Amino acid sequence: MYRYDEFDHAFVTERVAQFRAQVARRVSGELSEDEFKPLRLMNGLYLQLHAYMLRVAIPYGTLSALQLRKLAHIARSYDRGYGHFTTRQNIQYNWPKLGEVPDILAELGEVEMHAIQTSGNCIRNTTADPLAGVAADEIDDPRVYAEIIRQWSTLHPEFSFLPRKFKIAVTGAPNDRAVTRGHDIGLRMHRDDTGTPGFEVMVGGGQGRTPIMAKTIRSFLPVDHLLSYLEAILRVYNQLGRRDNIYKARIKILVQGVGVEAFAEMVEAEWRHIRDGALDLPAAERDRIAAYFAPPPYEDLSADCPALDGAIDADARFAAWVESNVHPHKRAGYAIATISLKPHGGIPGDASAAQMDAVADLSEEYGFGEIRISYKQNLILPDIPKADLHALWLALDSWGLATANAGRISDIIACPGLDYCNLANARSIPIAQRISERFADLARERAVGDLSLNISGCINACAHHHVANIGILGVDKKGTEFYQITLGGVADENAAVGAIIGPAFDEMQIADAVETIVDVYLQQRETDEPFIDTYQRIGPGPFKEKLYAPDQAR
Amino acid sequence: MPLIKHGKLVEDTWHDTDDFADVQALAALGPVIVNLAVWRQHRDAILALGGTLGLRLAPGQTPDIVAADLHRFSLIALEFARFTDGRAYSQARLLRQRHGFKGELRAVGEVLRDQLTFMLRCGFDSFSVDTKRQAESILDAVAEFAHWYQPALDGAATIPALRRRAVDRGEAAAPAGCAANWAY
Amino acid sequence: MPTNSIQAITANRLSDGMVVYLTAQGQWSERIRDCQSADDPGMAEALIAQARQHAESGQIVGPYLFKIARQDGHPVPLGRREIIRTTGPSVGTDLNRSKPRE
Ligand code: HEM
Ligand code: SF4
């Protein structure tokens, strides 16, 4: 994985010193809150309901064991012993003190991490396929380009005060695990007929109150031109994006307003001026960064693993975990293991310091000391020999980290909601807890199969409820929490926005409503048909009918 | 208002006003900065005065629309209506890079310490700062970072360029590959 | 806002972000029971003016008025948001604010 050189180290150190001085100027009264707020946000520091919240970037979702131990240490020493992994490959601490934040950032700098641009109206932490480098379906490793984008976008002089936040995601595989169309810019790597690597460039995706899937403005951009092309997009947006209305300030509104063809033409016109210039990626620099992502020293293992087969036969719980949480690796004899941070009845995405330390240890014991953070708010161990899966699972189980639900209905993406968030209309975590408890029975959850369920506590849609098969949105009706359901959202390469099914349910009804939806699906599905296919085949009617039937207590 | 130019606190010799009786009155003011509307309305009369001219562009007024006249101005002032309104950064780069503007590029409006380096790197070379702020403290901001990642207009070598030099000198360390090679 | 609603002032402390309430002595307390209540709009105005000065001088951030009721002589917040602000997150109570930091 990427390692800082002297320049990266110096930069992050200077950034910490700068923020330390800014905090001191805030405390001394030299800076007002209005002046300080954009500065702290660009260092990931929010002020939430109960306390400050620090959001730390996990660039393209890759961590070393050492870095994860540092995250655990920070949770223990500066926070309340836990952290919250988010769907954008960040970790959030909910209780830091203002004066200690520079110390936290300095500690992060020691392990080559930072919180730069995890908030604010700037280019945010660039996310990537969490299975980059190991997925069997990968064409190219997106992390190389995510790192190049990270460096280019860091304290960009022109694009640090954009109309609104700006999120970029990169995938190198046809199966999109990074929701690229849900971002301001989505980049999908592929190769043209000559084998030259490049990107499909998608622009104008976003969620919030106006969910829109990004449109392709260029089907193939050779990789050398990546940064000049991004600069052209950002320059058009910086000048023309709306600044008078925060709800209309995202690039998606601009693209929608001028039309995708006209927008593409503006970008191409700007790009013609700046392409083939200082931003072109010299092959040497690209190769230098790519070398950091060279594969680890894999052993030559057989694809068959009798030990694994035996363990699967002997232990039904383990077999269920392998079925849902283990994915094919591009290397024979290896597997990718998802560590669910969604225990039934637990807080989605939360991990205690002890759990983080344990995962760091396990990543070294069974893998190459590397951990990934997924869109689904789970941890992933990317390089586990198949023969070690059972031992790994036993160890995870002892830490409460072996829930066999990856991709299942209880693998819920949930935002912090009203329990932590200043903007919330309703709580999301307790709803997630209640629903996941309903599906705690392993056999039942397996019978339901793959199904995504996401819960956001307000229309900002931080938990991506719009692109969940079952999306739940918390709303406030005269002081009471209500939950609106959308069905049919999809977050993969066929990304689609779900449709509202009908009137909202209250806190006591919402878990029943989810069960009703699942029951309809189970009755209507054809053999092995996943929920989303059934929904697309039969439409919302049967669900609506059952949900709002007169005999349903609402 | 205090003015910082080329890293020093200097006397402002320009007269920046939207408030004048008629175009002839401008002649008496010395070097004068006019806004785009005034320029468009009185262009020929102002040119006939023959004085040293500056132009002030509001956010959203792209330099492209006065491209043909840019050589007539010794100074262009770009307005930061709010410090969070970042349009002037793009305007500045376009002026310098696309239109080759060589004159003084001045930041006016909400010009604060913590945005100074961004402005410098986008090609601004003078800064009209609020009286209540210490112009000296603003200048400290310039020293906060030694190097940056992106090519910009401050003429400094970027981090990628410095890396290439290190490689050419044979000083760069070999990449470490996977996480297992993290040695501390 | 009906005149009979009682209000108090809350904010977050600058130094650690903790939820605080303006007291009768013009201090900021973490305990809602210490809050100064305003029974009429005039008093509410005076309190928020005082709180804004404290925000200006940098003790606290984002002061605002919110509605309370009195139960057994103690102020209690009205509305879910303010209830959660006084009690801490309703989930993971083992990790709650009432628990001292490890
Ligand atoms: C707790 C403090 C948080 C605040 C104040 C916050 C604020 C916001 C706001 C205002 C938006 C809407 C942006 C827009 O429509 O332009 C948004 C969107 C989003 N946030 Fe958050 N958020 C928070 C936490 C999180 C967390 C925990 C996650 C990850 C789980 C997250 C991920 C996202 C995502 C993925 C979006 C949608 C992206 C988009 O709008 O295109 N946020 N957030
Ligand atoms: S969706 Fe709303 S409630 Fe949830 S974290 Fe985002 S802003 Fe807060």
Image (cartoon, helix red, strand yellow):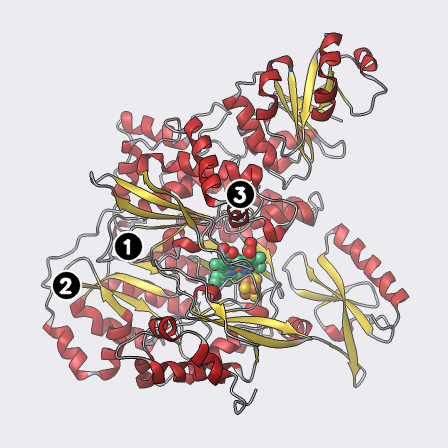
Secondary structure found at label 1: loop
Per the image, the residue denoted by label 2 is A333
Circles 2 and 3 on the same chain:
yes
Q: Residue at x 16, y 69 (%)?
A: A387
Chain designation of label 1: A
- Against A426, is B30 above or below? above
Circles 1 and 2 on the same chain:
yes
Q: Position of residue A100 (x, y in %)?
A: 56, 54
The amino acid type found where label 1 is placed reads Pro
The reply, left or right, for residue C67 in relation to residue B153 is right
- Against A374, is B86 above or below? above
- Against A271, is A375 above or below? below
- Looking at the image, which is closer to me, A502 or A180? A502
Secondary structure found at label 2: loop
Residue A174 circle label:
1
The mark that comes first in sequence, 1 or 2, is: 1
The reply, left or right, for residue B168 in relation to residue A542 is left
The amino acid type found where label 3 is placed reads Val
- Looking at the image, which is closer to me, A143 or A106? A143
Residue A258 circle label:
3
Residue B89 circle label:
none
Q: Residue at x 85, y 73 (%)?
A: C2
Mark in front: 1 vs 3 = 3
Q: Residue at x 31, y 67 (%)?
A: A338
The reply, left or right, for residue A62 in relation to residue A501 is left
